[in-house]
Image (spheres, helix red, strand yellow):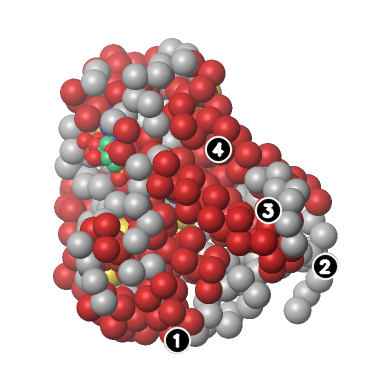
């Protein structure tokens, strides 16, 4: 097991345009010689006036629109946009929405220039997993802080016909720019605000809660972001609290949680996401809510393997000073579960009226997608994953 900080490259080309009243700058951020396709979701951006601002800012551009990208965007819908892009010759994309619209846009950007059938962008037994080497340029206007997709190069797409939810990514699928206006979060309902806090929290944990390699910068960054979420989380989920700094801190934390800063040179886990995506694929539970079910259970089952970091987390993030090391570790896990519950996200399958039958179904999904040796050491076998699902019943 490597105990040193591994070699790394740090590259992030996304320009962040943060603050109040920034959408109007689309007029100069998007090149005027491009034919732009504006992509959005189920209509929230129309309802709350964001799309009107985008149209106004792009009034000097040639642009079209494609709406209807679902939460947990589907391959089936995205392929329709790919056909439109090719048929009409769009050469610049603009995502206006949350992680689903941004991920969908990344996929469309890559699929539009892909030499093979776009299904081969995915691996995991569904496609050939051919690397993405080119993509259309695109920018984003973020409306939901949660995924970090606005400043990273990855995406996740649901392939309905295959009951699969799979990731993809490449160095050419970073957004050119992302507009982050904290005031756009004022229309989010409590459930989405809670989802955002939990998804960001678990992103940080996936990159931090492994084993120590002495990466002081990465660790302290992660701990600071976790403490920020613990501090502001209860106020963030109060949908009537429109304090600007509260929402600005939330938005930037969510972006930083997964913009490729925390994972540099350190091991990563990502097993909670692996197990969670299968829950969404089969039972359509919101992404963040699947993580609230999996992570506390995973920490309990994997306590021994993660002991060093769990103790560090207990002491530095939750400031637990009393008791034996074992007690500190257990208290930290209990506090993590209680934090998710306090935000309104249940942490057991039974809260969704799902019972023992899910365990076999989910484990067989993991097997068919090749998730048989996951986590920071590759030692999370199907049997361990089974135990984690069972422990979350
Ligand atoms: O579709 P519309 O009508 O726009 O409504 C959306 C959607 O129903 C609504 N919403 C968005 N902004 C709003 C708003 N409602 C009111 N006011 C606003 N300002 O919120 C709902 C959820 O939106 P969605 O984009 O699905 O949420 P989120 O940002 O949480 O994205 C989830 C997707 O991102 C993937 C997840 O798997 C999931 O598919 N992830 C992407 C990652 C990445 N690219 O790095 C990493 C993550 O771990 C995650 O897997
Ligand atoms: Zn996530």
Q: CA distance from mark 3 to mark 2?
A: 23 Å
Q: Residue at x 32, y 46 (%)?
A: 100
Residue 15: tell me if it is visible.
no
What percent of the width, then of the height, locates residue 366? Answer: 37, 78
On screen, residue 316 above or below 92: below
First of labels 4, 3 by sequence position: 4
Dot 4: few (<14), some (14–19), or many (≥20) neighbours within 10 Å?
many
Which disc number belongs to residue 229?
Answer: 4
Label 2: few (<14), some or many (≥20) within 10 Å? few
- Residues at circles 2 and 1 in contact by the CB criterion of under 8 Å: no
Give SS at disc 3. Answer: helix
- Residue located beneath label 3 in the image: 314
Q: Earlier in the sequence, mark 4 or mark 2?
A: 2
Q: Nearer the viewer, mark 2 or mark 1?
A: 1
Which residue is painted at 61% across and 54% down in the image? Answer: 332
Rendered location of residue 278, percent (x, y): 32, 69
């Amino acid at each position: 097991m490597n105990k040193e900080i591994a070699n790394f490259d740090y590259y992030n080309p996304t320009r962040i345009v943060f603050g109040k009243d920034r959408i109007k700058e689309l007029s100069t951020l998007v090149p005027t010689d491009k034919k732009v396709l504006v992509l959005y979701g189920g209509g929230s951006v129309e309802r709350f006036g964001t799309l009107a601002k985008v149209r106004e800012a792009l009034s000097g551009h040639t642009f079209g629109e494609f709406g209807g990208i679902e939460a947990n965007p589907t391959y089936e819908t995205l392929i329709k946009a790919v056909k439109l892009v090719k048929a009409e010759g769009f050469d610049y994309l603009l995502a206006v929405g949350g992680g689903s619209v941004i991920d969908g846009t990344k996929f469309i950007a890559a699929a539009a220039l892909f030499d093979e059938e776009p299904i081969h962008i995915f691996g995991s037994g569904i496609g050939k997993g051919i690397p993405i080497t080119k993509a259309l340029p695109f920018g984003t206007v973020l409306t939901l802080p949660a995924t970090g997709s606005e400043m990273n190069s990855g995406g996740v797409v649901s392939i309905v016909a295959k009951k699969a939810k799979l990731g993809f990514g490449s160095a050419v699928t970073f957004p050119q720019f992302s507009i982050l206006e904290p005031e756009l979060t004022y229309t989010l309902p409590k459930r989405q605000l809670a989802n955002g806090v939990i998804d960001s929290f678990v992103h940080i944990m996936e990159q931090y809660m492994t084993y120590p390699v002495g990466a002081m910068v990465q660790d302290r960054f992660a701990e600071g972001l976790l403490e920020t979420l613990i501090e502001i989380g209860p106020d963030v989920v109060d949908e009537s609290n429109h304090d600007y700094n509260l929402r600005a801190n939330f938005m930037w934390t969510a972006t930083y949680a997964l913009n490729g800063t925390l994972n540099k040179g350190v091991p990563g886990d990502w097993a909670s996401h692996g197990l969670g995506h299968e829950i969404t694929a089969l039972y359509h539970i919101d992404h963040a809510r699947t993580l609230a079910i999996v992570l506390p259970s995973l920490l309990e089952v994997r306590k021994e393997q993660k002991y060093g970091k769990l103790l560090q987390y207990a002491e530095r993030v939750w400031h637990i000073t009393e008791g034996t090391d074992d007690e500190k570790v257990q208290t930290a896990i209990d506090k993590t579960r209680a934090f998710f519950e306090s935000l309104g996200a249940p942490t057991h399958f039974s809260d969704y009226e799902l019972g023992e039958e899910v365990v076999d179904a989910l484990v067989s999904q993991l097997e068919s997608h090749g998730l048989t040796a996951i986590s920071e050491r590759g030692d999370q076998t199907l049997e361990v994953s089974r135990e984690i699902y069972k422990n979350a019943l």
